[in-house]
């Protein structure tokens, strides 16, 4: 299972959780990761792009409540 995790994410889930848990602003960190995906696509690095996308999806499924319907709400700064 660890090998599959590393193949899909490019690192262990523990390392990825450490990366998320040390973020000052998780939204900025996730946006940066999506920018990295764009760069990978431009460079033709499909494998790395997919790994980063899987890392972002990991965040949503492990760190947010996906059990219920949750409406999107815009937060005014």
Image (spheres, rainbow, N blue to C red):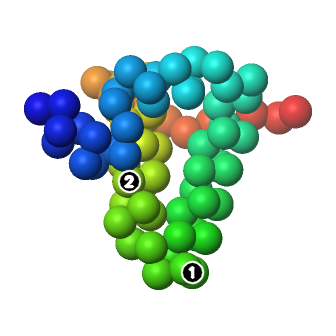
Query: Where residue 53 is drawn, which disc sits there?
Result: none
**Vertical side of 43 occupied by 20: above or below:** above
> Is label 2 in a helix, a strand or a loop?
helix
Q: Quadrant of residue 20?
A: top right
Q: Residue at 60% of width from left, 43% of height from top?
A: 30
Say which label, 1 or 2, has the lower sequence index: 1
Q: Residue at 17% of width from left, 42% of height from top?
A: 4
**Vertical side of 64 occupied by 45: above or below:** below
Query: Where residue 51 is drawn, which disc sits there?
Result: 2
Whether residue 57 appears in this view of the structure is no
Q: Residue at 73% of width from left, 28% of height from top?
A: 25
Q: Residue at 57% of width from left, 18% of height from top?
A: 21
Which residue corresponds to mark 1? 42
> Is label 1 in a helix, a strand or a loop?
helix
Q: Nearer the viewer, residue 24 or 13?
A: 13
| Crowd class of label 1 (few under 14; some 14 to 19; many from 20; radius 10 Å) | few
User: Residue 58 at x, y = what percent?
Assistant: 37, 36
**How far apart, in angstroms, are the residues tagged by discs 1 and 2?**
15 Å
**Vertical side of 58 occupied by 36: above or below:** below
Q: Residue furthest left?
A: 1
| Crowd class of label 2 (few under 14; some 14 to 19; many from 20; radius 10 Å) | some
Whether residue 8 appears in this view of the structure is yes
């Amino acid at each position: 299972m660890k090998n599959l995790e590393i193949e899909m994410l490019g690192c262990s889930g523990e390392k990825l959780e450490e990366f998320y848990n040390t973020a000052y602003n998780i939204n900025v960190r996730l946006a940066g990761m999506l920018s990295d995906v764009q760069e990978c696509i431009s460079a033709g690095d499909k494998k790395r792009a997919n790994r980063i996308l899987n890392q972002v999806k990991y965040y949503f499924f492990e760190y947010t409540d996906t059990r219920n319907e949750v409406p999107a709400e815009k937060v005014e700064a």
